[in-house]
Image (spheres, rainbow, N blue to C red):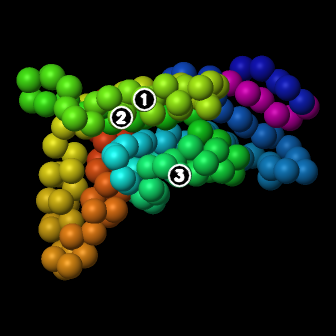
């Protein structure tokens, strides 16, 4: 734990930077515990599903789906508004661990993400079956068939599933 200003402490918790404010501050109310979010990316050729945790890193929820060519500007804008501690991206592989047709695309965007966001760690996670799990979740939620055909929703839910699985793996 280190004190950067009177009443404001920065410390690490499970490799996550935290901020605790013990007195009124002009930007942050007192006794506020702030943690950065974890952001998950389900990258595709046309669309990219994005999910984030809540600030306490308890719940993973789908944020949105953006056209893949707009991903970097979207993330720059999002990271200016919300603190992001870690980015997770799905690594597409076949059942035998061989690369899929999407693997080169994902590796290319990983390079761009590392270049554009050098201060935010980036981890890859296995994304096998997440789209199938997302479709199953949509059926279980009682979504109408017409709504289940929306591929943007599938990508967003798949990102949320990847993020939830990652959070469970580190707890």
- Which numbered marker is on residue 70? 3
Apparent side of residue 152 relative to residue 68 in the rendered image (left or right): left
Q: Quadrant of residue 42?
A: top left
Q: Position of residue 39 (x, y in %)?
A: 48, 42
Q: What residue is pinned by disc 2?
A: 105
The residue nearer to you, when weighing 150 against 100, is 100
Residue range (magenta): 6-11
- Which numbered marker is on residue 144? none
- Which numbered marker is on residue 108? 1
Apparent side of residue 102 relative to residue 59 in the rendered image (left or right): left
Q: Quadrant of residue 119?
A: top right
Decide if residue 137 is in sight here. yes
Q: State yes or no: residue 7 in magenta.
A: yes
Q: State yes or no: residue 165 in magenta.
A: no
Q: Bin the neighbour count of mark 3 within 10 Å (Cα to Cα): few under 14, some 14-19, many 20 and up.
A: few
Name the chief secondary structure element in magenta: strand
Circles 2 and 3, Cβ within 8 Å, touching? The answer is no
The residue nearer to you, when weighing 5 against 109, is 109
Point out the image quarter for the C terminus: top left
Rendered residue at 85%/44% (across/down) = 23
Q: Secondary structure at mark 2?
A: helix
Q: Position of residue 159 (x, y in %)?
A: 35, 48
Q: Secondary structure at mark 1?
A: helix
N-terminal label among 3 and 1: 3
The residue nearer to you, when weighing 82 against 35, is 82
N-terminal label among 2 and 3: 3
Give the Cα distance between marks 2 and 3: 15 Å
């Amino acid at each position: 734990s280190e004190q950067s200003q009177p009443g404001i402490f920065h410390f690490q918790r499970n490799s996550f930077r935290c901020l605790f404010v013990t007195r009124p501050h002009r930007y942050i109310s007192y006794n506020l515990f702030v943690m950065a979010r974890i952001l998950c990316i389900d990258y595709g050729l046309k669309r990219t599903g994005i999910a984030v945790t809540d600030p306490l890193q308890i719940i993973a929820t789908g944020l949105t789906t953006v056209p893949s060519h707009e991903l970097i500007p979207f993330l720059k804008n999002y990271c200016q508004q919300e603190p992001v501690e870690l980015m997770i991206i799905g690594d597409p592989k076949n059942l035998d661990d061989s690369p899929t047709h999407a693997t080169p695309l994902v590796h290319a965007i990983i390079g761009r993400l590392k270049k554009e966001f050098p201060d935010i760690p980036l981890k890859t996670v296995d994304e096998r079956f997440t789209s199938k799990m997302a479709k199953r979740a949509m059926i279980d939620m009682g979504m109408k068939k017409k709504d289940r055909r929306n591929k943007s929703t599938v990508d967003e839910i798949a990102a949320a599933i990847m993020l939830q699985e990652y959070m469970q793996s580190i707890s």
